Image (spheres, rainbow, N blue to C red):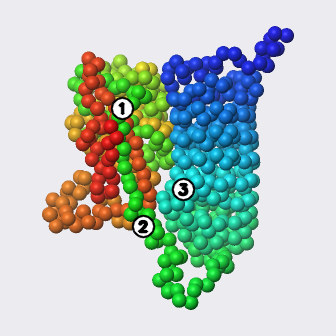
Amino acid sequence: MSKKATKSSPPSACWPEVDAVRSENRRELKLTGAKVAKRIEGNGCKLEEAIYELSALNLLDVNDTPLEQISPRIDGLSHLQSLLLYRNRIAQLPATIGQLAELKVLDLSGNRLCELPVEFAQLHSLTTLNLSFNQLKAVDLSTLDKLSVCNLSGNELTEVPRFYSGAVHHLTEVNLEKNNIVLLPEELTQQQILRVLNVADNKIEQVPKYITKCVKLKEINLKGNPLKDKRLLKLVDQCRSKQVLDYVEKSGYQPPKQDKPSPAGASNEEEHANSSPEPSLEEQAEDVQLKIIVRKVSENTPKVSFTSEARNTRPHIVLCVVRGFPVTNMRKFLQLQNALHDNECGRRELATIATHDLAKVKGAVRYHAAAPSEIEITALGATAHGKVTAEKYYADLRHQAELLRKEKKRNNYSGVYKYITLLTAKELFAFLSDEEKVISLPPLTNCDETKISPTTTDILVEVTSSVGHGHCVRVMNALLEQMLLMDVEVVSGAVPNTPNETATHEKKKGAKATKAARVEAKVRYNRSASLTVEQVQLYDPEGKPHSVFPGKGDLHGDEAKGIFVEMSV
């Protein structure tokens, strides 16, 4: 009798995951698996109430459970940036969800939602939204002014939702597959940087010409629709998006004009001004601002110290934290780092970049150096091998590089192998570690545990060098600028060359060429953007404050690119 009562009643003690978050001051809470599912079911298909008191949480992830209810107390998670509640049984959201002012990523896919609360419209920081495979019949997202990626596939929508259509554009990807949509509205053409549109498996019979006014549209999926145009139907099934869009532009459906005739006295110029979006786009570009905002060290910033061994081995290091930066395009993020390594970093001979998911960095960070046989790391992408010594990792790299070189019949190395010579004959290897593990082994690799993922929002950035502090600062400037520009499109002008290329050009062409280059470098973007950078305090081996980065003058922006730095410290 007592056992049965205990089983059906809510647990009296806090769940162990909640205790761990509290005691270790974590910023993430993940609940999944059979044990968690059983615990939630025994708690009336609700979460432990203590979870809503973890106000410092940045990420809450509860998936594949019988969870049915979200408490109105969710507004207590005021710093929440990622809320992942996919594949549960949630049928209704509390109105207080609208109070999550910092929420950027929301995944409620695979639930039982039929409608969204009115207060949902208050989630103005939201950049990524996944409501796929629910039972939604209508959705209005017109107030979500920062929304970039939206997935509403597998619902019961009969119309394309309304999206924000203000002066600044963010929406790049929309998935409306497996709904009951009949028409592609002309309002979609207001999304000037929309790149991906998936409307497969709907009830669309005609594809209007105006859809090609989405000038950045690169991928469109129309498969599984009852298209009346048989040639278009064949193209959709057999060809790429470019051929489909080219055909629609020439032979797509032309809806009857709804506009009233122009007044008798109206000029052609006036008609063009009213119909063409180009002038308004240029006017919008005038007000675009790109800012790197520097904030002072906070209580949540990791404490970083260095040792004398590190100073003697690889002397130079700068670090900072980028806050509120969800990586929506992982491939592009990795490509920009690779490009910087090859160019600004001089193939890592001048400096090396590493980025870490801050939520996965535990406690204080130490920059140290030791014999490679004493360092253990789970190298990035090598979890199958587990932790290995730096000595073994380096030896394996050298062996693999030699085999590959012989196989390809080359005289030099490629990929990560081209950096192994940088550690030849080194008695000590520099590394960064947190309180649990080695997180970085420059110039070779990061650890797998702190790698960036689609749920990452805060990033610890490090740049190290054996050559000079100036190279670290220069590379960090370049990296932060590239991160700021990641989701921004150029609408006129051209982004100037890198400083190295510009300097070479100016030496060759002289002062006149320099002046001309500055005029040509005027560039306009489609939207404003900001990057929040938090300072990191570096401590010396005695535990005394050594330096803070970025300090005044460390980040200089780029007037030619329209990038400015704001010091809020």
Relative vertical location of residue 80 with respect to residue 541 in this rendering, above or below: below
Alpha-carbon distance for marks 1 and 3?
32 Å
Which residue is at 62% across, 68% downward?
Answer: 186
Q: Residue 171: which numbered mark, if any?
A: 3
Query: Could you say which quadrant of the image residue 66 lies in?
Result: top right
Alpha-carbon distance for marks 2 and 3?
19 Å
Q: Is residue 388 left or right of residue 171?
A: left
Q: Quadrant of the N terminus?
A: top right
Indicate the amino acid at tag 2.
Glu
Seen as rendered, the residue at the extreme bottom is 264
First-in-chain label (2 vs 1): 2
Q: Secondary structure at mark 1?
A: loop
Q: Is residue 218 left or right of residue 473?
A: right
Query: Could you say which quadrant of the image residue 363 lies in?
Result: top left
Q: Position of residue 532 (x, y in %)?
A: 40, 42
Q: Name the one closer to the observer, 391 or 186.
A: 186
